[in-house]
Amino acid sequence: MSAVETESSVECVPILSGGDWVQGKTQRTGNVYNPSNGQLIAQVPLCSVEETNSVVQSAANALAEWSETPVVERARVMFKMRQLMEDRFNDIAALVTREHGKTLAESRAEVQRALEMVEFSCGIPSMIVGDTMPNIARDVDAETNRHPVGVCVGITPYNFPSMVPMWMIPVALVCGNTFVLKPSEKTPLSANLIGELLIEAGLPAGVFNIVHGDKECVDTLLAHPDVAAISFVGSTPIAKYIYEVGTKNGKRVQAAGGAKNHLIIMPDADLDLSVKALAASAFGCGGQRCMAGSIAVAVGSIGDPLVSELSDLAGNMRVGPTDGNEDVDMGPLIRQEHVDRVAGFMDVAAGEGATVALDGRRDFAGDGFLIGPSVIDQVKTPMKVATEEIFGPVLSVVRANDLESALAIGRECPYGNGASIFTRDGYAARQFKRHFNAGMIGINVGVPAPMPWFPFTGWNESFFGDLHIQGVESMQFYTRQKMTLTRWFGSTGESHADPVWKTEKKA
């Protein structure tokens, strides 16, 4: 990647178009920071309509040849990509930590999930095969097969800059599509490293492209006539916008939105296991993930001991800079303004009558974007902390009398990403699994995020579209099905069955 340095030694992030790394011509740029120390590390171009159109054109130009490349050859590129990711594993993780701020352990886990998606894509030749039914009528055979949809676009968030793009890219490419990635302008460096590795893996020029930008760039992608499909992960308002505008322009769209994930703790739950799982769910990655636990529903008598032990555990978590430092449990948030927004929820909650059992606001050394874990008790469902996606290390505790009351809280929630229950009771677990209003369910699991072989099945306002990201549904999203009926004729030119004219003559 041909990076350019400014006079202040700040990297200018290039775009990838038609196999070439080029500098954006736009005068509008965004700043990329290292959240651990607040330093400006790069500037990213906010590409214009013309620049965005040029990148899409590169993908369109490469489509014909790539879509006709045998699927096994396309998969072999991903086998090479897997090896390159293994070789550069620690480099990728360190870059994620540098531009995002999550701990190195969390970044390594993210890269491992990204690598698993590459492994999943290597098996697509076994999944993309069609169906046949010989002699569906006399001398007539029926068959289905799958074709690429065309130029595909991925619009990805800052919180998983290496994993979420890889939810999309490997599957789309092995299915025969070309791809344009529009990563978050807050974390563009990991995306560009993915581009470097794909080129090194032997991907032909123009098959994979990267454009950087903001709303102007996104709106151009949503309306471009050569774009066939769009995958998005981000907040619910933007997911809804992407879905509505994309489908209005005739695109196939899958748009994963935000969440308010519930964690139900029954009175019979293993308290120590539950507290550790809740802390990992709510405070892992600084709470900046759509599967983070956001509301703990304490059922019956477990409420007071749960809040006490959770506040004690979270209050002793080591919070600090993560870049080059593994001696921390939780790192910074993405921006200082996001820290300020998350901190503001404590005052709002107290003003609405909740109890701030643990306030993460405290003085931290250095200029990093830091805030500690927070626990808010006695939260009622109409409160702001119970209804708005905070996307930070804040866990709200709602009290419920019984399991049915806990299920009712879920029914009131407009989201539906994930939820978990902690219990030893098989009946309670089964009722929860069958009836809680969410698409991904955990039983004694803090984060019920699926592995690549299963779809990311958000419900309600957590997902807009039909076919979900990951799993077989992802292959179905990036292909369209064609059915062919064939009537076979013999050497005389007639079907084995009497032709229509002969039947009519007999009649």
Image (cartoon, grey):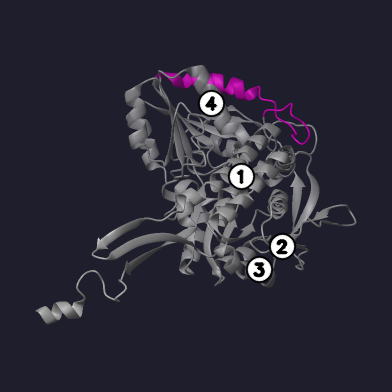
Q: Nearer the viewer's eye, disc 3 or disc 1?
A: 3
Image x and y of residue 235, in percent: 54, 50
> Circle 1 sits on which residue?
163
> Residue at the right extreme?
7
Tag 1–tag 2 contact (CB < 8 Å):
no
Image x and y of residue 168, in percent: 56, 52
In the image, taking residue 417 as reference, residue 411 lies left or right, namely left
Image x and y of residue 261, in percent: 48, 38
Q: Which amino acid does label 1 sit on?
A: Met
Q: Tell me, for residue 277, which label it has, or none.
A: 4
In space, the residues marked 1 and 4 are separated at their CA atoms by 22 Å
306 in the magenta segment: yes
Residue count near mark 4 (Cα–Cα under 10 Å), binned few <14, some 14–19, many ≥20: some
Q: What residue type is labelled 2?
A: Gly
Q: Which amino acid does label 4 sit on?
A: Ala
Camera-side residue of 15 and 39: 15
Above or below 220: residue 92? above
In space, the residues marked 1 and 2 are separated at their CA atoms by 22 Å
Magenta range is: 301-329
> Circle 3 sits on which residue?
58
Mark 2 vs mark 4: which is more N-terminal? 2
Q: For the point 36% across and 40% down, which residue is it?
A: 411
Is residue 349 visible in the rendered structure shown here?
yes
Mark 3 vs mark 4: which is more N-terminal? 3
> Circle 2 sits on which residue?
19
In space, the residues marked 3 and 4 are separated at their CA atoms by 46 Å
Give the quarter of the image for residue 26: bottom right
